[in-house]
Image: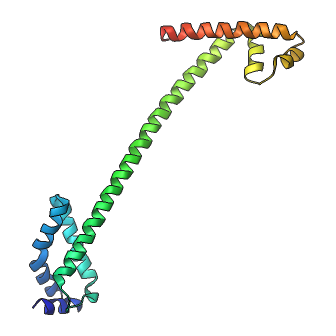
Amino acid sequence: MEKERVSNLRNGDEDSFRSLYDSFHQRVYAFIFHYVKDKDESEELLQKVFLKVWEKREHLDPAKSFSSFLLTLSKNLVIDHFRQVKSRQALAKEYNSRMKLADYSTENTVIFNETEAFAQSAISSLPPKRGQIYKLNRFDGMSYSEIAEKLGISKNTVEVHMVKAIKALREEYKSHYRTGS
């Protein structure tokens, strides 16, 4: 009887398909549910199993066990299901990781911008000549000798201005971050 229904199914007989579905769907569902442990997912996989049966009907061999074919098809779909679940979990983990990095990146950008604004303010509060010398050294990468030559002052004067600038900036930094401003 089963071989005849499979043979008729191969030829596109919908009644034979319904009959095979009615005969096997509970066993297939139980097999799937045993592994998946979720009613909705199991029902969805059950529908996929029988959709595959319909799609592959022309390749069915009535001489072979239809039950074994269903079991193999079900097992493969359960394995695919778990691969997809694992893949979705990995994607979710990656997404969460990237979102945390974005949060940190945003936080770091805010901190950097605040620190840069503080530094610019502190440097601009230096006496003009001292601020100019500090910027030429730290931002333009000029040596003390180059600065001295450019400004027409002694190298020793440049060193004195740099020492005083660094000391003033250090004090400004300490007082700013000690008070939490």
Q: Quadrant of residue 75?
A: bottom left
Name above or below for residue 159 compared with residue 75: above
Q: Which of 75 and 126 is in front in this view?
A: 75
Could you tell whether 18 is left or right of 84 in the image? left
Identified at 62% across, 10% down, the residue is: 170
Identified at 25% across, 86% down, the residue is: 57
Q: Which of 112 and 61 is in front in this view?
A: 61
Q: How many marks?
A: 0
Name above or below for residue 54 compared with residue 85: below
Q: Which of 22 and 73 is in front in this view?
A: 73
Name above or below for residue 50 compared with residue 106: below
Q: In which quarter of the image is residue 31?
A: bottom left
Expressed as whole percent of the image width and height from the top left, the position of residue 27 reads: 11, 72
Indicate the colouring scheme: rainbow
Identified at 49% across, 8% down, the residue is: 179
Expressed as whole percent of the image width and height from the top left, the position of residue 44 reads: 21, 65
Expressed as whole percent of the image width and height from the top left, the position of residue 29 reads: 14, 69
Expressed as whole percent of the image width and height from the top left, the position of residue 122 reads: 64, 12
Q: Quadrant of residue 6?
A: bottom left
Identified at 51% across, 26% down, the residue is: 110
Name above or below for residue 133 compared with residue 34: above
Quadrant of the rendering where the N terminus is positioned: bottom left
Could you tell whether 100 is left or right of 14 in the image? right
